[in-house]
């Protein structure tokens, strides 16, 4: 009996020692950033500026950073500022144009411009032309949509942020702006375009790599690639015990993090559900992929130096807006046309075919069903897109580039996007537009869900994450001073403030080596719309956006 007691005591001591040893081997960090894309890179850069003494750890499942949605080939590289994206300016039932969403998107992008400009000045980002280039933004429509574009232009001219934009229905003028769009076009076709010189093409993958490259030089930052988060447990002090598996060796490790940010793109929903926080029960996701026609033919790329966005076809959801994009990727000019929606049950390009099934739960299956029934136009659109042939896609291209030659173009697969569905008391479930910030009640874990407008607003979105997680520190004089050193206009509306808008335009253009912006000259009075209201006015309803 005595030997048994001694043996049990020894065993208990061994188990206790092993448990403590395991606890002691857990890495400690102040902030765990999950995902190696532009969201985590931006948040890490903010944290390094605001709280430089904090230890930051970033984990990425793939063997490098910026390999998923942030990768330049997995998105259209648009600096979304609503200059040309018609789905941000819906027509109300009375025929007037709602510009509120466009103003919000533009204000956010101006924060991003200031954020990137500040990083260039600090030596964190370098060689601006490697990640951002002036690229005129143009809207192009024909037929009945000409009246709408005229009214949109008139409405935007009453705002500060869209000054410098030009409107024309003249074939010759539009040909000067975008030669390939007009060459070979029927001279009798009724067309219209708006054009602005302040647009940009952005390589978000390059920004991500440079931001993380700078973070790696800091002793308070650690990057782990080939590392997949497999489990979360909340500690007694509301910090997080996170289990991570090396995808190459299979070896597991644990990290104790005071705070966690899930910025894993399409993978964020599944990870959010693993945390067990009640806020996760409100969400579901539906994956939508995108493909583009692409050409590298110098005869084409040398003539098309702008981004041209059109209007969605009648009956199609706004997420189907086609665009002909000038891009600068991997040191060369290319032109992309699309996107064409594709379907896969994967939530990430490098994800699993079980992603959709594994994130469907008893909590979110009903909202998903309601959304499917309430958005039948979206369902029809996705089915029709999947059924497109090569000839169908080329015919769509010829609407924007009449003289296109099929042999110049090839189809490439871009990234995956997850359309977020949220529980709704009245409708059961609704499609959520924009980017959804989820923060737990204890404010120790956060996640970003959604896709639109995505990377172009990473700076303001991640700053909003910090505002929600750290309300006291955020409003402290120390943090506010550091925020304003990076984004001088933060907390102020640019629209309506001519002097401040001009200053932000000029300062960021100089630092980022962009085209000199126009001098803002507000009209003395509202221009008179020459277009008649559409016979069947569109409702100013929420708009989906693939955000590619």
Image (cartoon, helix red, strand yellow):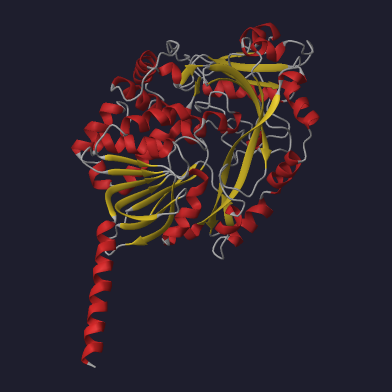
- Could you tell me residue 542's position as x and y percent? 58, 42
Quadrant placement of the N terminus: bottom left
Left or right of 278 on screen, residue 345:
right
Quadrant placement of the C terminus: top right
Q: Can residue 150 be seen from the camera position used here?
A: no
- Tell me: residue 441, above or below residue 153: below
- Tell me: residue 543, above or below residue 4: above
Query: Could you say which quadrant of the image residue 301 lies in?
Result: top right
Q: Which sits in the foreground, 511 or 31?
A: 31
- Tell me: residue 288, above or below residue 80: below
Query: Could you say which quadrant of the image residue 315 lies in?
Result: top right
Q: Can residue 29 be seen from the camera position used here?
A: yes
Q: Which sits in the foreground, 379 or 296?
A: 296
- Could you tell me residue 180's position as x and y percent? 69, 12
Left or right of 142 on screen, residue 12:
left
| Residue at screen point 71% across, 12% down | 182
Q: How many marks?
A: 0
């Amino acid at each position: 009996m005595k030997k048994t007691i001694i043996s049990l005591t020894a065993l208990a001591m061994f188990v206790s020692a092993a448990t403590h040893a395991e606890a002691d081997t857990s890495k400690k960090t102040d902030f765990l950033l999950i995902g190696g894309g532009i969201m985590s890179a931006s948040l890490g850069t903010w944290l390094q500026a605001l709280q430089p003494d904090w230890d930051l750890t970033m984990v990425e499942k793939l063997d490098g950073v910026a390999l998923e949605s942030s990768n330049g080939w997995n998105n259209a590289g648009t600096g979304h500022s609503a200059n040309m994206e018609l789905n941000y300016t819906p027509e109300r039932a009375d025929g007037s144009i709602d510009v509120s969403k466009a103003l919000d998107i533009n204000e956010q992008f101006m924060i991003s411009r200031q954020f990137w400009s500040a990083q260039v000045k600090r030596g964190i980002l370098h060689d601006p032309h490697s990640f951002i280039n002036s690229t005129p933004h143009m809207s192009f429509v024909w037929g009945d949509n000409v009246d709408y574009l005229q009214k949109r232009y008139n409405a935007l001219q009453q705002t500060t942020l869209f000054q410098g934009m030009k409107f024309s229905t003249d074939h010759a003028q539009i040909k000067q702006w975008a030669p390939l769009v007009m060459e070979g076009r029927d001279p009798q076709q009724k067309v219209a375009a708006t054009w602005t010189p302040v647009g940009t093409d952005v390589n978000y993958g390059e920004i991500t790599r440079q931001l993380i490259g700078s973070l790696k030089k800091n002793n308070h930052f650690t990057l782990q690639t080939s590392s997949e988060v497999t489990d979360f447990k909340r500690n007694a002090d509301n910090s997080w015990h996170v289990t991570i598996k090396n995808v190459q060796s299979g070896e597991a490790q644990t990290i104790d993090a005071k705070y966690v940010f899930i910025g894993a793109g399409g993978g964020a929903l599944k990870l959010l559900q693993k945390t067990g926080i009640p806020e996760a029960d409100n969400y579901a996701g539906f994956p939508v992929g995108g493909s583009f026609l692409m050409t590298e033919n110098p005869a084409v790329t040398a003539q098309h130096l702008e981004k041209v966005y059109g209007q969605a076809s009648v009956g199609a959801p706004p997420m189907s807006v086609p665009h002909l994009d000038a891009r600068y990727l991997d040191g060369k000019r290319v032109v992309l046309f699309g996107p064409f929606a594709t379907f896969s049950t994967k939530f990430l390009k490098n994800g699993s075919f079980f992603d959709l099934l594994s994130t469907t739960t008893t909590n979110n299956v009903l909202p998903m069903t309601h959304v499917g029934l309430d958005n039948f136009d979206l369902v029809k659109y996705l089915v029709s897109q999947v059924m497109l042939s090569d000839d169908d896609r080329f015919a769509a291209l010829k609407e924007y580039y009449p003289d296109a030659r099929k042999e110049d173009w090839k189809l490439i697969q871009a990234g995956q996007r997850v359309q977020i569905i949220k529980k709704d008391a009245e409708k059961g479930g609704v499609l959520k537009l924009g980017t959804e910030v989820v923060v737990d009640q204890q404010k120790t874990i956060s996640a970003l869900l959604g896709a639109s407008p995505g990377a172009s607003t990473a700076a303001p979105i991640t700053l909003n994450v910090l505002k929600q997680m750290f309300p006291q520190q955020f409003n402290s004089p120390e943090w506010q001073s550091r925020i304003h050193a990076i984004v001088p206009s933060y907390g102020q509306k640019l629209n309506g403030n001519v002097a401040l808008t001009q200053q932000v335009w000029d300062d960021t253009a100089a630092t980022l080596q962009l085209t000199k912006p126009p001098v803002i000259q507000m009209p003395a009075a509202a221009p008179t719309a020459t277009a008649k209201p559409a016979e069947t006015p569109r409702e100013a309803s929420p708009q989906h956006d693939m955000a590619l």
